[in-house]
Image (cartoon, helix red, strand yellow):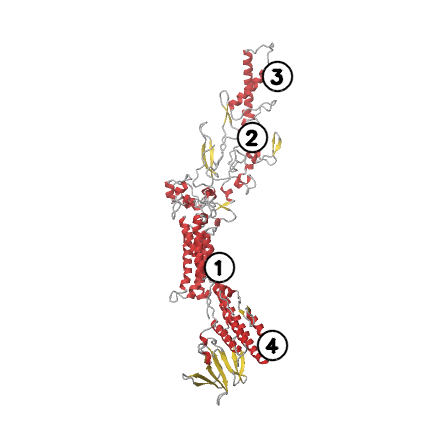
Amino acid sequence: MQTSILAFRGRRYLWAALALIVICIAAYWIDDPQEPPNGGTLLGYALGTLGALLIVWLTWFGIRKRNYTSTSGSVQGWLSAHVYFGVALLVVVLLHAGFQFGWNVHTLAFVFMVLVIASGLYGVAIYMRYPERLSENRGGASRSELLDQLEDIDRRSRRVAQKLPEPFQEFVTSGIRRTELGSTLWQRLRNEDRSRIQLPGSATTVANQGQEAAMDWLAEQQSRADADSATTIAELSALLRNKRKLLRQVREDLRLQAGIEIWLYAHVPLTAALLMALLTHIVTVFLYW
Amino acid sequence: MAYLIRFISKNAAGSSEHHDRRLESGPITIGRSTDQVLHLKDRRARLQHAAIESRNSAVHITTSALAGVTVNGKSERDARLSPGDTIEVGANIIRVIDPPDGFEFAITFELRDDADGEYLASKWSTPATGLGGFSKRKIAWLVVAAVLLLGFIVPQLFMQNFLQAGPVHSAHLSIGDDCASCHVTAFQRVPDSACVNCHTVQRHTGPDQVSVLGVTRCASCHLEHNEPQQLVNQHQGLCADCHVDLSSTSGLQGASDFLDQHPNFRVSLKRPPAIDDQPWNIEHVELAATSAHDQSNLKFKHSVHLLAEGIVTPEGKRVIECTGCHTPDPGGARMQPVSMDQHCSSCHTLAFDADDPSRTVPHGDAPAVVQTLIEYYSARLLDSDPKASSQRLRRPGEALSREDRDRVAAEARAQALRIAEDLFERRACVTCHTVTKTGGDIPWHVEPVQLTQEFFPHANFSHAAHATGVSSCDDCHNASNSDAATDVLIPDIGVCRDCHGSGDSRRNANSQVPSTCVMCHGFHSEARDAYP
């Protein structure tokens, strides 16, 4: 049984992050600076330095997780710490700023930080739910197994179609060639089915969402066919029905997978923006010391 | 139940060969996993793809794969098997055959002829594709460039306000967006020279104090771009850190917190000089001390004037309000001086002749009083009014003789002094003033009156700022119970503490206003010791 990253090693990083939060709040509470709390008091500089180091360390996770030969703890532990200290960072930075905000480059850095943390929390929520839904949907099979089954059905359909007149072979080939699983994350996330099919006797293609057009055409052919052909067409129909089920399963698989991946398209670029805004913040503060 | 599995393969020459395997009990598991009885090396098969076992004295194949298994060309999830049936899983073909002796069930297992390499590649693939052609890295670089451009470069050139950590204090708005007028050198703190370009500084800035305070920069206390906007350091420690105990070096009493670590109030009272015409002295007296009484030389009872039922005035009975005599200055902070002319004379009239009540003697100048009376009575005697004086009969056009003039003058002077004596000693002056009889032409001396205008010249206080929280003047000053002019009607620290508490709001028990030293005291400002 895989333990959740949140529960890693008895939630040790939760307690560590909570301790950090408590220490920072206590310091802020005890500290009595001569001016209203801000980033320029002694504690303000200390919290600012801590916040900047935390940001750099949290970003380092992106490098650590790719370093498979690293011996500095497990990636699971790093991710657990990454999540908890990422949330703690919000408190550290709020205290650093003394809760002062404005339309300026300093608050800009804060906004990027909040967006990074929010997208990260969304990612945590996704990681908590989606893997289970993924395996539930796959029913124990892997993605490639599903795809191979799909191909198997295609191959069998072709074979069955060879027993039927030429248009049926064109029909099967077109249906296979023009069935799409969605190429961009966005299409997959929205479960867009852009599949089409060129029906025999037609010069153009028609939308084939959920293989409906293909099913309809086959049903029509079956009703017109003689007894022998009808049996073979029924066989083809059965294969197509299975293919439709499989496609639905694969699409759901891709949709969930896209959900798992897409938040990183916010989290990672926003992190880069945060690093730039943080640098700007620090340079600006000391440029106009 | 014994199963036979016959593995059929082709040798290099192309002819079939087989080997058998006996299985004593079911099921015959089929799948890609290596622990399966029939181990399929086909990616289209699942790890545990299907199983063949006997059930209810028949043999079935069951699968949980959605695509099922193909039994005799038809996709099935659960099919009863009998000899002659053909099962397909990917490129693998399983045929059910008549079981030889000693077996209850038998199958052959072989790869389809045309299966070579078929399962090694698939049309279906789902490569990671990114977000419409934008990879995470590409998006990241774009955003970084945008932040650098819009967050730093553009503000540097066109909108430096965007770089501010907080708004400029309204007192500095005239500087506008000229950042360099204070931020003289990049990466260096704002120097004091930038402040003294406009500001002059007074107390607490000499070399001694600065070294004592350990403060070298104006901006250490006067912090800009901060919120709440507060250019003046309000912090308790600014004063209290040193003033908690200065007794050994300066003799000042300790003061570190208004709530309970603050000396009792000491008022600055005017004291008459030993010799007349010298300036009055100022004595700092603790309010609670017995010596804390006013020596203004005025006789006055607040209690008599503030009777709730009112007092008799020339216009009838009237209730006198505090504000009838004490009017705030235009700023509302302090009270304007009380004067005889404006505030007293309507009741305390200086009329001296009941027949002519509009005629009054001047106030504040004893010789002028006597002179006024002499002139008045001389005129009266010289008038033709027979009642005014005993006149000798004269012919028309005859001038007064010298004797007559002298006699009238003497008579007028005697009359004037009689009236003056009445005014000075019995009727008018003595009501409010201490009058002593002396020798000389004008034998009365009125002690000069000096009312204290500033009881707390070192403190910032505004009546206007207290107008909302206090219902009447008596709340603090308790004037209606004061029976003597010597009473100092200045509230002591306890009255202030009803509303004002510690500078550290956490120490205040109720909703007291957190009050640090600079709420009443100035750090740099000069004390207002000079009296008007």
The crowd level at tag 2 (other Cα within 10 Å; few <14, some 14-19, many 20+) is few
For discs 3 and 2, the disc positioned in front in the rendered view: 2
On the question of residue B229 being in view, the answer is yes
- Is tag 1's residue or tag 4's residue first in the polypeptide sequence? 1
Task: Please tell me if label 3 and label 2 are on a single chain.
Answer: yes
Callout 3: SS: loop
Residue type pointed to by label 2 = Cys
On the question of residue B247 being in view, the answer is no
Task: Please tell me if label 2 and label 1 are on a single chain.
Answer: no
- Residue on which disc 3 sits: B387
Q: Is residue A264 above or below residue B355?
A: below
- Chain where mark 3 sits: B
- Chain where mark 2 sits: B
- Residue on which disc 4 sits: A224
Residues tagged 3 and 1 counted as in contact (Cβ below 8 A): no
Measuring 38% from the left and 40% from the top, which residue is drawn there? B206
- Residue on which disc 1 sits: A118
Instruction: Give the CA separation, mark 3 to mark 2.
Output: 34 Å
Instruction: Give the CA separation, mark 1 to mark 4.
Output: 59 Å
- Residue on which disc 2 sits: B344
